[in-house]
Image (tube, helix red, strand yellow):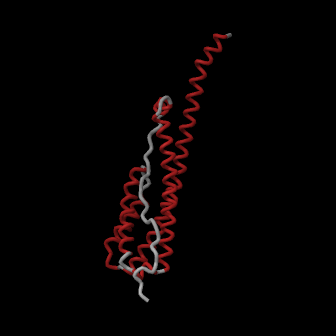
Amino acid sequence: MPVLIIVAAVILLPLIFVIATYNSLVSLRNHISDSWGNIDTELKRRYDLIPNLVGTVKGYAAHEKELFERVTELRGKCVANTGKVSDQCGSEKMLVAALQKLMLVVENYPQLKADSHFLQLQKELVNTEDRIQAARRFYNGNVRDYKNRCQTFPSSIVAGAFGFEGRDFFDVDPAVKKVPSVGNGLSS
């Protein structure tokens, strides 16, 4: 009887470890997918705001046609990009840079900065950027936990045996950080 218990322990304990590790890796992978969905939702919200923002700024700074076309082109590229996170990260960085340039243009137009429609759009964009950054932090935390689990011994053996692939972090700065104060440069 004691030999049977020892044989059962030698067989069952590794099997239980493999099953538990596999299930935890699947759980982490699902958390990553879920948290990416949160980012994707907020990015789509940003994409929906951009045409209105460009249209409003265009009314005041029509000569910035090249910048408006670039922002519109990059928005379209980002909307169409549903590939790997690293690919999306690259196109998002270009869009963020273009949006930051657009916001710099706004600084030259005090009347635009005082326009209530523009201020509302900018406020919504700032809120969206805050939510993107919160979702990004949550996603990156899940990716970090998953990578740690896949790369540490002995769970790395299970991850390798069952083909758990690495995931990329999503590192993009916010396009807009705050709503500028109104009243700077306005004359009565």
Q: In this view, does 55 lie above or below 71?
A: below
Relative image position of residue 159 (x, y in whole percent): 48, 33
- Residue that appears at 52% across and 53% down: 37
For the image, the number of numbered tags is 0
Identify the residue at horizontal 52%, vertical 42% (top origin).
29
Q: In which quarter of the image is the N terminus?
A: top right
Q: Please report the residue visible at 34 percent of the width from the left and 67 percent of the height from the top.
A: 70
Horizontal and vertical percent position of residue 127: 51, 65
Query: Residue 113, located in which quarter of the rendered image?
Result: bottom left
- Location of the C terminus by quadrant is bottom left
Residue 23 picture quarter: top right
- Please give left or right for residue 105 compared with residue 21 in the image: left
Q: Is residue 53 above or below residue 91?
A: below
Q: Which residue lies furthest to the bottom in this view?
A: 188
Image height check: is 40 above or below 109?
above
Residue sitting at x 48%, y 60%? 43
Q: Which of 151 and 81 is in front in this view?
A: 151
Query: Which percent across, then down, holds residue 103?
Result: 39, 71
x then y, percent, for residue 67: 33, 71
Q: Is residue 156 above or below residue 55?
A: above
